Amino acid sequence: MTEGVIADYVTPSEEIQASDGRIDPAGLLDEVSLYNLYDERDSPEQDAERILDITYPTKTLTAIIKNTARKLSGNVDFAEGGQIVGGEYGSGKSHIELVVYHLFNSPDIGQQWLDQRGIDVELPSETRTAALQMFNLDKNYDRLSEAVGDYLGIDEWADGADLPQVHEIRNTLEDKPTLVLIDELERWFGMASRTEYEEDNLAFLQNLLEAAGRDDTPLSVFVSLLYKDEEIQAITQRTNPFTHDLSSRRDEKIDFILHRLIGSVDDANGVSALAKEYTDVYRQNDQIQLDDYHDMQERIERYYPFHPLLLNLLMEKYSEQRISSDARGLLRFLTEILRDNFSEVDFILSGDVDVFAYTDRFQYIDSELVGKYVNDYHRLQKPDGTFNEFHEELLNIVLLHSLARGGEEGANKRQMLMGTMRKGVNAHRIIQIFTEEVYGHAWHVHRINGEYAFDVDENPAARIEKKAQDIHKHTAIHRVESLVREDLFEGHNNVHILDPVNTEQDIPDNKALKIVVSLGAKRSYDEDFEELTTGQSREFNNTLVLVTPEKRSSVDTNTGIIELARKVVAGEQLTREEDVLPEGFDEIDEQNYQSLRDRVRDKYGTVHTSTERGLFPQDLPTGGNIDFYAATVEVVKPDSSQLRSEVKNVVKQAGAKGIQYEHLKNDFYRNTDFTTLTSEDGLEDAIDSLCRDGVIQVGNYFEKRVGSLGSDTTLLHEQYIEEEDDDEDESAITIDTTSISSTSPKGTNGGTTSTGATTKPDTETEEKEKDEASAAFECPQCGTELEGSECSECGFEFSASDVREGKVSVDGLNTEDMLDAFGIEEESGPTIRPHPIMGTLDADNKPDIIDTLERELGLEWEIHETEITVDGTLTADELSNYGISASALDKQVSLTETFTIELDEPMNRQSFLGLMMDLNVPEHASLSVKLKVNKGD
């Protein structure tokens, strides 16, 4: 904003300056009366120089002066000597008559004034003048002819004489230039005491105007009218005089007022720059659309320091006054406004008018409406007497536009903005402040056809606002909670609020899908969800999904939403409590609800589903009247291929014994590592699909549609199906024997017992034991002879636990014999075993190997050793990391890397998965992983 205040650009006129330079309305001559011309005491009206000095030569005044001068100069080509000046009280009629009087009564002073202002008029050297303000004449005349005769010094028209005819008037004037000014004729004429003289007075007025219309009579007659008496109007128009209606010439009045207030413009360039600055603000704002910005800029410069809209508005409202109206009363008021803002602002907007300080002036226009304004003014006022930003200004603007039009007209958004906006002020903020903080809080401000107006009746919105002040914050938030459940989520009974106010949180622990909605917004909801699930010892933790506001935009702490909710609750309470409510109440109540609904809807949303890494957020589709419940279910609904994969892995991990359907289903409802089921149908479809594809067997169904699923229906992975038919377990590793050795098993030394006695052994038994004891064993992985329980060639090995669990077997040997045969000792302490027992975990890319590891590794497993092999081809960018800059070799170079990790302290599952995630591998690479783990069993 341009630096400076009004005092930097203009100097006040001498008329309104006190001796110390301050602006003082006391010196203002804001009302003149023609009768003071004849007062024995000195009066301002008698001072021709002062009157002319404060007068601005408007087009109307200049035309009147020229017409009068031509008529009184005896110009035979110009005969129209009658002039009618019309307008309401205070419109400037008397001032014009006073100026005309002084110009022709004091021609030396008058001619000098005309010459200084460039008005090409030659005044007569001597003019006989008479100014009659009919209600303040020297004596109580009943006849107009006698009054005019006395003031012109014509005795022939005295009381009792015959009514002067047109030619008698001409002869009596004797070719001497004569000016007659008649003010307030209508009221004088209409007095009851003069009823018997009405015809005479009308006749003389007509004769006087007809004489003024003759080219042989140097007579000019002025009559000022309020347009209150039809008979007077009819007479004055018979001679077709010049008629000047001051009530329609607002720009001239403004020019006259500014001339009275502003002595000089000291910085014309600064005023021009300021006018452009304000116009640019309007041009750049999409809520202010003017037809002609150039015209606005010129008007701002012309009317400075007052905004043109303010001057027009006040002129319009002052014309509505019953007393002290229009230019007369406005002149003093604008002097006071200028005084209040002279050193405060750079430009006076309508919002700068201190309406409350001048309510006595506005009460003349509309006392009842001003009374309602005062009530609302105090309602918005803070305890310390101040106001929140723009509250007072906006309230004042609405009143100014509503005066004399209460409940019918008011201020629109453009007028509010142009009454408050300066450079750097945000227009949208102004409108938001009004709609959220003023409208509704001011009980008598109504919205009417896009405008906001004061009315004497209470606004239904304000009735609601008044009631809303008693609504507790928690009650408002509780209403928002019910809106979320009943409106946004269509009233579904499986929708719950996270940490609701005024009620206990009661979320059933069952297998049904449950949507939990948070009104609060946080960076992370993991702790809240953990408290909701494991913190409450729930069983079915994978049945909860969390819906939250997006971008950390809380609902329960948003002031605007809480205030709207208060209004909604207030409206609902009033509807229940009151038999009769103001007209328009239902419409506003519904509007408040829809506004609250829209504001709450706009805050959402994000859907969070649980995973072993924490909550996983997904965007919730919004907009229009979307059903949040259906949209949430659609987001959470499991992908069919993912669900198939998870079911397959669970069934496979169950081994040869399989898993009952009820246990499988419960695993999904309990374990947050799994996909969240929105319905049991999805799980059944996945099982049916896997069964038909021959991946699993469901009860007696295999490679065909599943007929039915019972709680005890067993699901079996395909790799165990054939072994079950052959009484073999595919998951067990069978070790074959190779050639016979010469050694005998321990404890069978030639049939000698431990006591040294010799017995004859059973030949068949002895031969069998000899063969088993003398056998060597092949590695089931590579065929090399095993060294004890390990293969030196490929690294295959097994433990006592693997033997006892039946994962490794030799035909014909039981568990104890195998432990003896392979020299395996029982583990003491943690059992560390290879995983997988035979082979590796393989994947074609890094994401898939991580996914495989997440499914394979148990939550409590500890990793002691690992071997990670990466086989891939390198892109040109990846080759550059090895110092090879050859784009032609893109994807032509293969790489095999093996990472062997032996740990002093074991690594837990999560740390190992993190290591794999951070592992930098080529874009095109397959991975293999071998592990040695302690499963904690």
Image: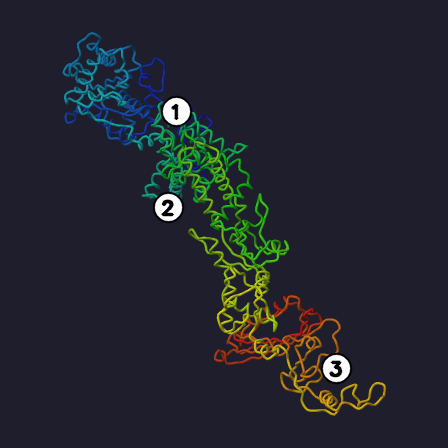
> How far is disc 1 from disc 3 in space, using C-alphas?
119 Å
Q: Dot 1: what SS?
A: helix
Which disc, if any, is residue 820?
A: 3
Q: Give the colour scheme of this rendering.
A: rainbow
Give amino acid for label 1: Tyr
Q: Amino acid at mark 3?
A: Asp
- Label 1 neighbourhood size at 10 Å, few (<14), some (14-19), many (20+)? some
User: On the image, which quarter does residue 439 sit in?
Assistant: top left
Q: Residue at x 52, y 56 (%)?
A: 607
Callout 3: 10 Å neighbours few (<14), some, many (20+)? some
Query: What residue do we see at 51% from left, 76% from top?
Result: 875
Say which of 161 and 608 sits in front. 608
Report helix, strand or loop for mark 2.
helix
Q: Determine the CA span between mark 2 and mark 1.
A: 37 Å
Task: Answer above or below: position of 728 versus 228.
Answer: below
Residue bearing the label numbered 2:
283
Amino acid type for the residue under numbered disc 2: Arg
Q: Can residue 107 be seen in this snapshot?
A: no
Q: Nearer the viewer, mark 1 or mark 3?
A: 3
